[in-house]
Amino acid sequence: MTRDDTGATRLPVGHSARRRNSRGWYLLIGVASAIVLSGAIFWGFREMRNGASRNETRQRFLELAVDLVCYSEQFGRLPCPVRRESVGRPTEVSSPNGAGRPLYSWRVEIVPFLMSWHGSWSRSHAWNDPVNAQLVELSSFYSYDADEPSDERTESFPDTNILAITGPGTAFGDDKEPRTAMADVPPGTILAVESRASGIPWAAPGDFDIRTMPRTINASDGKGISSRHVGGFHVMFADMQVWFLSDKLSYQTLEKFFTIEGAERHDREKLLGPFALHRAGGKAFGSRRKDEEREERGHP
């Protein structure tokens, strides 16, 4: 600083400009910091929601695994993919009458083993028969869309997001094969997978058949194996493990574990392990849940 002839203090030439430039930089840094912080908060909130959504889906698959084990222990086999009418009779449902008429899916067949429901339904009527209206209460177990407000849904039974792997040689088999007990299925066999847009009401007959299913993973239309969760999809194995697999995994590798023979021949840990983003369940989990289920139902 200098003094002029009157004795007043004068700033060096250019000092005011530098001070204005400094204020500009401080403002710019502040704005940039606020943008970065906002982005981090948004990213964290989105990840928290994604994590909660993945956990909810994983829990549904885990409970389903236990229910299938309990069903298999009681009946000595896995449920039929499609329950059919055994004798012909008139019906109010708009579908063919007579023996062999599809009634409902295995997803309905295991209803008595669901801990979360204590309603009633008729085994001798179709899934959409008025007598089975209470089944709608279970929609949230099988469907993403059931989480939406009811006035935004167009169907009483929203589409399922859990589909079994069926067809010749699979654990569920098809109509021409005898049912397999779950205990006899190799641990690495895939029983069920996630699908974002199945187009199948959850109680209706319909699953993935290895002969006709889309050979895709997380395709844009969501028709094949897919999910609404970022980065991957859930699968359930015969040993009650549920894995969230990366969508970088190829369909050709995954399908090796669709059949009993394939699961026996291939190493799950070697082929699928590197793509497992999260793992849960297993025999220990199943034992605890079965004990809880027996206690819930008043069985020793």
Image (cartoon, rainbow, N blue to C red):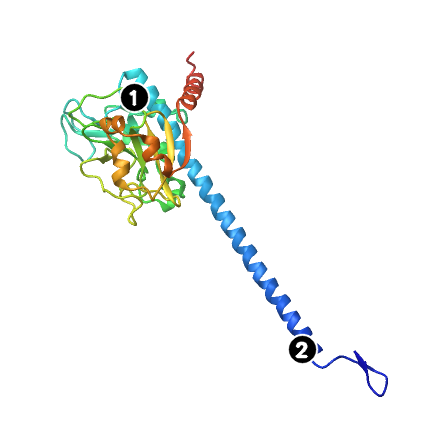
Q: Is residue 227 above or below residue 39?
A: above
- Specify whether residue 46 is in view: yes
Residue at 57 percent across and 62 percent down: it is: 32
Q: Which mark is residue 182?
A: 1
The number of callouts visible is: 2
Q: Secondary structure at mark 2?
A: helix
Residue position for label 2: 17
Q: In the rendering, at what x and y percent does residue 152 appear?
A: 37, 46
Q: Nearer the viewer, residue 222 or 238?
A: 238
Quarter of the figure with the C terminus? top left
Answer with left or right where residue 196 lies relative to residue 101: right
Quarter of the figure with the N terminus? bottom right
Q: Quadrant of residue 64?
A: top left
Q: In the rendering, at what x and y percent does residue 33 appear?
A: 58, 59
Q: Is residue 94 above or below residue 152?
A: above
Answer with left or right where residue 245 lies relative to residue 14: left
Sequence-first tag of 2 and 1: 2
Q: Quadrant of residue 10?
A: bottom right
Residue at 80 percent across and 81 percent down: it is: 2
